[in-house]
Image (spheres, helix red, strand yellow):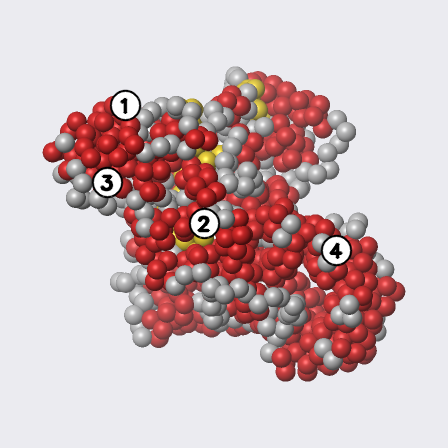
Amino acid sequence: MEIRVLGPIEVWASGRPVDVGAARQRAVLAALAVDVGRPVRPESLLDRVWGERLPQRAQHSLHVYISRIRQALEKSGASGAVVRRSGGYLLNVPTEAVDCRHFRSLVRRASQRDVDPAERIPLLNQALALWHGEPLAGLPGDWAARERQAWQRQRIDATLHWAAAKLLVGDVTDVIESLSCLAEEQPLDERVAAQLIRALAASGRRAQALSHFTAVRRKLAEELGTDPGAELGQLHRALLRGEVDAAEPVTPPVPAARPVPAELPMDIRAFTGRQAELAVLDEVLPAEDGRLTVPIQVVTGAAGIGKTALAVHWAHRAAPHFPDGALYVDLEGFGPDGVPRAADHVVRDFLVALGVDGRSMPADHPAQAALYRGLLADRRMLVLLDNARDAGHVRPLLPGAESCLVLVTSRNPLTSLVAAEGAQPLPLGLLSAVEAGNLLRGRIGRRAAAEPGAVDQLADLCGRLPLALTVVAARVLTLPRLTLGALVAELRGAKPLDALDGGDEVSNVRSALSWSYSLLSAGSRRLLRQAAALPGTEFSVLAAVSLTASDERSVRRWLAELTDTQLLFTSALDRFSMHDLVRTFAVEVAAVDPEPERTEALLRWLDHQLHSAYAAATVLHPHWDSIDMAHHRAGVVPAFLACYDDAMAWFAAERQVLTAAVRRCADLGLNTYAWQLAWAMTIYLDRQGYWHDQVSVQADGLRAAIRSDDTVGQAHTHRTLARAHTRLGWLADVEERLLLSADLFGTFGDLPGQAHAHLDLAEAADRQGRAADVEDHTQRALTLYREAGHRYGQAMSLNAMGWYRAQRGEHEAAIEACREALTLLQQFGDRHGEAATWDSLGYAQHRHGDVDAAIVSYRHAISLYRQFGDRYYEADTLRHLAEAFAAADDRLSARQHWRAALRILEDLDHPDADQVRAQLT
């Protein structure tokens, strides 16, 4: 039996087609087929087949369709082809019976490093022969579009892989013809262009190779406003030197280059014990064909039992079995604030690790989750989800691909994950006496041999709990003059914290921590106590400098002492974190510090975060209006951020910490810090498309501003919250919030603030089709900006006015407004505003009948958008440019630009892609 989805959805048995029903029923079959061998939950099937437009009896219809599919397949000899499992419905046929999975298997075999090029060619020929047209042909909906796009990318990669292998063996037969067709289909794909140029050169057609390079360079300049990339440029220079020929074909990436995440924490040095558990984990390694019998492995046990150490150590051992990389996240299921990492935040971070930049990020959670699953669909990856609170915490992060292994650690047993998703549990207990002793011996070294009895006593005193053993061993290494027997006596005398003295493993940890803590220098002890009270899970060196009001050299010395004794861990370059139990211990011992001292330390840290965030935001947007902030306290050292990339990197590292800080400040009544930190994050979150984060952060800021009756904070947070709602399409409360924001700005005479709110009101009115209100708000904004002498705001409102007027047919007035805006923006050097204005100008010129001028303006805008990576507006302007070419009766150029826009919108999973597809038909 063959189930085909790489083209029209078909089933063939014994050389004959099988009738599997009408379009919706075939959609159900396809939704099962792409996950052949794995249960698909009913809600996933409903989403794939109907999307958000569920009919009233969708669940009933789904059951009917599955029953009919089962009957049709059984009549063709596939008994038990569709079965019900605890996790959903499962298509129970061999993986190779489904063409897309057979295709992936063949490509994976061909991509292995030990496969000779001559052996790759028949494998890839066989893989490409499975294609019969557009994947999932005729299937409507977002899920089908995403799947279609992902499979098309894999087809292109496989074709390039095949062409590279053919060139390596000196066989150019069919290569030029196949690559020429692909180049016509993908005219702006530089990988395709480079491979075709290599093939032409290898066949002795150097002049044609140079001609194709020139054509591609011209298309890139005309359509994208950019030059060829490094690889294509180097290839061109090699052609000019005559260094690319049949004897020396250049090998492209195989398969096409894509990020290979390597996010695992550092392996555990001198890992000892757990041999039985490691053997159990080894049993879930993938088979030779990459398929996993157990897709989810759960490691459970008490705090400090060594779950993370085991998982990380085994993950490093298993890494060669997962050539496409490893993703890692600490889910903070039992973190200091009691608030675990939200799954949607984790998905976004995983997408970034997989090569999706902020501008390409879909706006809504379901689209992000679908993109995440789609990107993992053809990869062999390990996903380590550390410190999960419960099964619900894990489910949104499961890939769905049978080639990806998910390794989960948790203090809870996650029984529903075992029951519903087929996860395999591995509970951890205390180390055996032998393992505990061996762990200490491995860490302590030669001194253990001289006093074997003392080693065993130390292990017993630590309760054979790995965390306690690790802390004690680290401290032993710092005390080379004391005998182990003396250390045993000291540890026996160490008094556990009364609040946690329960005669269990936790008490053993407390005894070990109390003893190790007592031997730290005074500065290190103070840093540990103060850091334990911080929001978030990480802090930087400069944050520690500000926290302690100390010099950087001393702070680095204390951090080194704390990491040497395993009380802190280095989570990244110059960033530090601590185990939950260490944090709990440090918070308790911090009770000895006077309350004013603890408060002052926290406020210094908040000053560092706030002033660093403000500095970063100012680098990202030099024309951003400032707010009145108190000067930072003595001893605070804000981060120095010299350039755009530094500012973006700082925000990327601190985003989760800042989010936690806003929430903590709002909860503690530190209201000014709460809304000002939220304000300082606005530009970064908006630029990166983190609009859900924006909503969460601004809601906390607004809560704090309302509590303190801070009208300035309320004005800013209402406006930013409304902007985020607008981006997400949540328009119900936008006008009310923005009107309130404008009124609040008016109460303290902030004319630019009022103008900003009116400009945002114009955008909201435009989205709701209220043309009269659009004009009123843009005019009001321009008047306020002029009264305030705010020239940058004038430029932005003139641009908006030009755009809206052009839409209403007032073309001459629109062109005049846009040119006035351009004059101002070019004085400021604001490329983003200039790009938007060139686009508005082009739109007005086109509608006024001056198509040639419009084409020039659109190209200016595209070139600028390309410079700073704004892909959505690049696509939007490409659409406008295509319309201009169509008006000039240049249908070929129009289609080229529509296709370029469509590729970007499909990457962004943006709903406008449907409109472009309609224009191309």
Task: Identify the residue shown where x is 33% and y is 71%.
Answer: 238
Cα–Cα span, label 1 and label 3: 21 Å
As displayed, is residue 425 above or below residue 866?
above
Task: Identify the residue shown where x is 47% and y is 64%.
Answer: 635
- The 10 Å Cα crowd at callout 2, few under 14, some 14 to 19, many 20 or more, is many
Residue farthest to the right?
Answer: 772
Residue on which the image places disc 2 = 531
Q: How many callouts does the rendering have?
A: 4
CB-based contact (under 8 Å), mark 2 and mark 4: no
Task: Identify the residue shown where x is 26% and y is 38%.
Answer: 473
Instruction: Kindly identify the amino acid type of the residue bearing the numbered disc 1.
Output: Ser
Cα–Cα span, label 1 and label 4: 60 Å
The earlier-in-sequence mark between 1 and 3 is 1
Q: Nearer the viewer, residue 456 or 759?
A: 456
Q: Is residue 703 left or right of residue 153?
A: right
The earlier-in-sequence mark between 2 and 4 is 2
Instruction: Kindly identify the amino acid type of the residue bearing the numbered disc 3.
Output: Val
The earlier-in-sequence mark between 3 and 2 is 3
Where's residue 765, x and y in %?
Answer: 81, 60
Mark linked to residue 709: 4
Q: Secondary structure at mark 1?
A: loop
- Can you tell which quarter of the image residue 61 is in? top right
The earlier-in-sequence mark between 3 and 4 is 3
- Can you tell which quarter of the image residue 741 is in? bottom right
Q: Is residue 673 left or right of residue 851?
A: left
Mark linked to residue 329: none
- The 10 Å Cα crowd at callout 1, few under 14, some 14 to 19, many 20 or more, is some
Cα–Cα span, label 1 and label 2: 34 Å
Where's residue 919, x and y in %?
Answer: 70, 57
Residue on which the image places disc 1 = 432
Cα–Cα span, label 2 and label 4: 31 Å
Mark linked to residue 476: 3
